[in-house]
Image: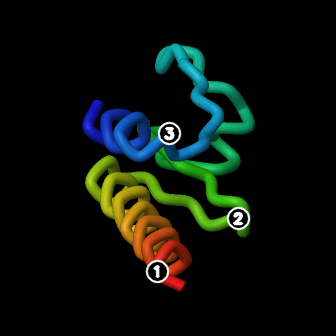
Amino acid sequence: MRARMSIVRTNFQVELREVILRDRPEHMMEVSPKGTVPVLLLDGGDVIEESLEIMQHVLELDVVRRRTALDFTQR
């Protein structure tokens, strides 16, 4: 839940997929052999499987985005 909250808070663009853990999709198991949720597959192919790490990743990207926007407006 906390990973999803940070995604919503920062307007991070993702494709959310609800899964039934009794019947994990094959693609999910290929991406994350542990079969745990949440799991975030990044554009470069890296995988983040822990909610706290997903939160940190999303929030760090948001900080960079805000700094870049601020730098742009100050020029």
- Neighbour class for label 2 at 10 Å: few (<14), some, many (≥20)? few
1 left or right of 64? left
Image marks 3 and 1: residues in contact by CB distance under 8 Å: no
Tell me how far mark 3 sits from mark 2, CA to CA: 17 Å
Residue linked to disc 2: 45
Position of 1 compared to 43: left or right?
left
Identify which amino acid the numbered label 2 is placed on: Gly
Dot 1 amino acid type: Gln
The residue that mark 3 highlights is 35
Residue 56's image quarter?
bottom left
- Under circle 3, the secondary element is loop
Judged from this view, the residue extending furthest toward the bottom is 75
Nearer to the camera, 66 or 71: 71
Residue at disc 2, secondary structure = loop
Label 1 crowd bin: few (<14), some (14–19), many (20+), radius 10 Å:
few
Q: Amino acid at mark 3?
A: Gly
Q: CA distance from mark 2 to mark 1?
A: 35 Å
Residue 74 image label: 1
